Structures are given as structure tokens and as C-alpha cells.
Amino acid sequence: MTSTHAFWLAGRQATGEDSFDVHNPWDGRLVGTVSVPTDAQVEEAVAAAYAVTAEFSATPAHVRAAALDHVSKRLVERTEEIAQLISAENGKPIKWARGEVGRAVSVFRFAAEEARRFNGGEAQRLDTDAGGVGRLALTRRFVKGPVLGIAPFNFPLNLCAHKVAPAIAVGAPIILKPAPATPLSGLILGELLAETDLPAGSWSVLPVANDKMPALVKDDRLPVISFTGSDTVGYAIQQSVPHKHCTLELGGNAAAVVLADWSSDADLDWAATRIATFSNYQAGQSCISVQRVIADASVYDRLVEKVVAKVQAQVTGDPGDDATDVGPLVSEDAAKRVESWVDEAVSAGAKLLTGGKRDGATVEPTVLAEVPAGVKLATEEVFGPVLTITRVENTDEAFAAVNDSKFGLQTGVFTRDVQVAFRAHRELEVGGVIIGDAPSYRADQMPYGGVKQSGVGREGVRYAMDDYTYERVLVLTGLDI
């Protein structure tokens, strides 16, 4: 019998009146039962966060840094346990789950380092104009207020870490809402934070039902919202609270561009390996998984042959098996949607090169060519283990194809030409350009986010810290400088 998992209310464990079950998408077994906070408990958490804002923002840097260091170290100590939990509730292959824990370790470590550096201030002499003689401006950053962090299911630990760690680093109270499908990993962070000396009320982890979120989103005591998820939900949040600061990390249909100069067998092997791996890792449930391959005509046929072979070599099966590359999607409904999009493309004339079949929540790694414009696979985010391959005649066509999308998160460009690399950086309408690799590369300390319908704002610890704070200037007058 699985015991009910408590949630974390203003730094302490609590239970509500209702609960829900979390099931493994691979085999349907019960992973855990999670208690749901009542409306009164949610109000208590918000009131506590609002009340502690001044105290928490004034907490010495070494206290916040020590708490973040503690969480980082405890994640290391509990890596295997937490990886098994991620795999069980999410269906993520265990090797990718271990990698996710390792990334969360780094996020908290980076946040501890940034907390020690944060807010030293910047002095600016104002006597560059006659009216500023004797004046000095000192600019520092101050928290905007408590943060509402809304995390997705696909990285149930690390994307919770990207909400929580920067908030603690700057001294902003945070209420974390993990995804309903995968709340247990977020609750683990609560366990670790409870071992620290952070003030009561400075953090809560509340598995609130989605239909209860509009009231929480609109609460004026939570002036900052950090959301990761679908573009539909993200922009609905932004439109409902236009006066708030919203950081939105939304979807994408990331492209991998293989140009003419990337033509040796070794080069194409590398590109095909990275494309096959990162179109299918997380079962394609990543905003920057490879969905589109855009290949120069001179390398197209050789690349397609290699990509198909390497996709077919991906091991699909039990996520608990160390050999598994591709596990199930988060639910059977999600898999049925992906299957329907593949069927739509094939019916419209796309050529199915491999895959396309579904078994429960698992979709075979799938490759399609000659996908007609206008079908969902060509325009939307598939969020499944599916990629399309398109032939282009030159770099102009390739970059135009990348930009022919309502999304703009990241793009990978396989080239050895430095001039082309800088051109890609200049011309591609995305938040990140990865040269010599798939678009799926992300370092957790770098700025991460998109343009167009891929969102606004940036994650990456220091960049999120900027989003959670604002600049306030102090002008000193009558100084002999």
C-alpha cells in the first residue's frame, strides 16, 4: 500500500482533504498518492509568502547560498533514488533520469555561486553632464515580490529547480506548482529545502489542481509568474494578467540544419547520431527535441540513410532498463495524439521512412520525408518521437525554412564555416543557435528561451534572477568625486 505524500506549506509538511494517484505511464502501476491542498491552505501559503518577502529579501547572501549548496549536495547523495522516482512517474528512461538529477545538482550549485555574487551594485558617475556634478548613481536589484513557479511534466525535477533555485538566490519567496502528472519530484525538493534554515513562508510546494490555477495566477500578491509549458496555456496566463511579469518558456519545433560543407562520412555519422538521439530522448517530449531536419541537397540522400538507420537502432522499451533509449509518452492520450498527427501527414502524401506505430503510451521512433506544408507535423510542436526531413538547395533556403515557423526556440546548424555560423546567429529567428550539434543542447547556466510563440524571458540561473528582480537607482548628491 502506498502512503499519501504530503505537500509543503510555508516550509512545513501538510495534507489536505483530497488526493490523487500518480501512475507509471509504462505499466500503469501506482507510483504514489499525493495530497491536494485546500483553498484555505493555498491562501495560507500565499499570505505567508507575501508576509515574509521583506525578511527573506534581506537574508544574508551566505544563508541563501548555504541552503542552495545543501540542496545540491543532497541531490547528489540521493541521485539514484530520485532518478528512479523520475523514471517511475514520468516514464523517462533511467539513464536520462539520472542525467536530469545531475543537471538539477548543477542548477542549485550555480544558484549558490550566483547568490554570493548577486547585487553588489553598479556605480555610475553622473557628472558627464553639467547638471550631474557632485552626483553618483548606485544601481542595485530588488525582488519584485513572491514568485509563482509553474513547472511541466517532461523534466519534473530540473525544471522545478529552474524555478526554485533562482528565487532563493535573490531572496524572492516562491510557490512551486509541479505538474499534476509528475508531482513527486517537486515534492522531493520540498524535503531537501525543509532541511535548511530558510525562513518559514519563503517557499511552498503545492500540487494544486489545474482548474484552481486561474485564481492563483491572478492573485496580486504574486507579481512574478514563471511558467514552462504549452504556448496555448502560457499566453492565456499572460493575457489574463497583463500587469504582471511573466517569464514564459513555451514550445518549439526545433530544426537541425545540415549544410553542404558537413559532408564527410564522419561528419554525417555524427549529425545522424545526434539527430536520432535527440529526436527521441524523453520520447521526444522536450521543447528542443529535433523535430525538423533540413538538409542540403548535396548531402541529403546520404544523411537520410544514416538517420533512418540510427533511429531504427534506438532501443524502445521499459524505462527502468539501462539499455532503453526511448520510453513511453506521459500518457496514452498523448501517444494517440502523436499517432494521429503521423497518420494525417501520411494521408496527405508524406513518405513514412520508419516507425509510425503505437503500443499503448509508446510510439515508435518515426521519420518522415516529403511532409506537405500545412499538416500539424509541419507547423505545430509534436512533442513525441517524430522527425521530418526536408531537402533544400542552399543555405539561403535552409535558413528560410528554419524561420518559416511560428516558433523560435533553438536551432542546430551543422557547419564548419565560421562565417556561416555568425550568419546563422544573425539571421535565425530563435533564442539559441547551436553550431556543430543538435538544437537540443542546453547548459543550465546559459540563457535559455525563445522568440515568436516560443515565449518571453529567459531561464538559466543568472538570467532568471534578473527576471525576478528590478533595478532601483540611488543617487548620492553633493559628493566630491
Image: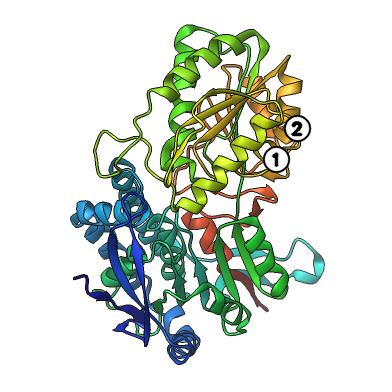
Give the position of the C terminus as an image quadrant.
Answer: bottom right
Colouring chosen for the image of the structure: rainbow
Q: Would you name the residue on which mark 2 appears?
A: 373
Q: Residue 360: percent from the left, percent from the top? A: 42, 46
Decide: is 401 above or below 25.
above
Residue 220 found in image quarter: bottom right
Secondary structure of residue under mark 2: loop
Decide: is 70 above or below 110.
below
Give yes or no for contact between labels 2 and 1 (Cβ–Cβ under 8 Å).
yes
Q: Residue at x 53, y 34 (%)?
A: 386
Q: Residue at x 71, y 39 (%)?
A: 429
**Three-letter code for the amino acid on which mark 2 is drawn:** Ala
Residue 19 found in image quarter: bottom left
Q: Nearer the viewer, residue 427 or 454?
A: 454
Q: Which mark is residue 226?
A: none
Q: Would you name the residue on which mark 1 appears?
A: 379
Q: Residue 305: percent from the left, percent from the top? A: 51, 13
